[in-house]
Image (spheres, rainbow, N blue to C red):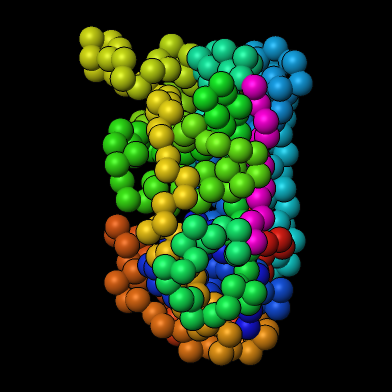
Amino acid sequence: MRITELGTSQRDAWARCPALHYHQYMMGTRGWGITPYAEPLALLFGQTGHVGLETWYTSIRAGVDPLAAVAASVTAMREKVTAIQKQWAERGDGESAPTLIDGDEGDLIIAEAFMAGYANYFKDDAKFRIVAVEWSFNIDAASFYEPALGLVKPPLPLSEMPPTRGTIDLVIETDKGFVLVDHKFHKSIVTDLETGSSFWPQAITYSRAVELTFGPVAGFVYNQIRKPSGLKPKTIGGELESQDAFLERLRAEYILYPDYFERYNGGRKRGYFLRSPVLPVSTAPKRFLAECLYRDGLMCATYALLPDRVDFNAPPPTIPRNHAECSRWGRACPYVNLCTWGYNPATLREFAEREEAHK
């Protein structure tokens, strides 16, 4: 079995649990992994948010007024949800497609509402010299690891190792070099994100790709969007607030309270957006690339011992399982039943093969 791609998400999954990596990125007849049917709904705020921002930045890059571009973003987000619901409808097992997300009818409305506040607060982004929106890269192994060659001997030859791939939300050109922007959607803002160990692998990998493709990198920006907590449709006079009224109230939230560090309503309320400054990134640290080269080589060597393709319904190959990851942060791994009970109709029915390779 041959790994066809590597990236930050794949490396993280392998480090956490090789069995998790196998299920997410390798299993199935296509070799692209399997995904829980419920996964897209649980992540709808972030998924639709990325679609909305991609459409918005593409529009303002083309000269559309930032506030007018919101309409196209909302349309794109609704089309994304329709596609997800269609996926459920095509399961063919008699279950209806969910119309709500995590049982909360406000989630889709929130995903639409944040665009109004975002466009209002960040309307000056129309002045950016945008080079690329949702830019997918594919960097061959020899180029990606080049600064680390000679520092470590990989378990496999570079010619047998896959390219490093990924998708960068936004690439901007500045007078000091190229700046990368990555959008994150959270229930709460992480103020020290740039000091976390999970931040730097993605930042360095993305910066390396931009450096090789466009030129010198000035830095990396983390742009966070927070989901309102505790905001639900109100019951007034015994009647539930309409969705249109709730949407307007949410739009007002995002417009009136944009800055996370601003203390609104006498300090009782935080804003919803936090954009980091441009964080300098050393684009080719040899130690990081040397560690990547060795770990990636081990991963590829492990899979090289397995059959070329494993049937969706076939017993899993011998892939090490990290039991500590079966329940992380109090939440069960979506693949835990597959590992515990094996592949059978009951455990497989909640999954589908990915229709395209992970981006």
Relative to the observer, which residue lies in front, 205 or 286? Answer: 286
Residue 210 in percent (x, y) is at 59, 43
Relative to the observer, which residue lies in front, 153 or 36? Answer: 153
Count the marks. Answer: 0
Residue at the far front in the pictured view: 150
Question: Is 357 left, or right, of 122 in this rendering?
Answer: right
Quarter holding the N terminus is bottom right
Q: Is residue 149 above or below residue 195?
A: below
- The answer to whether residue 185 is seen in the rendering is no
Residue 77 in percent (x, y) is at 66, 35
Residue 220 in percent (x, y) is at 47, 35
Q: Is residue 210 above or below residue 64?
A: below
Q: Is residue 130 magenta?
A: yes
Residue at the far left in the pictured view: 267
Q: Which residue shows up at 67% across the image and 30% down it?
A: 131
Segment colored magenta: 129-140
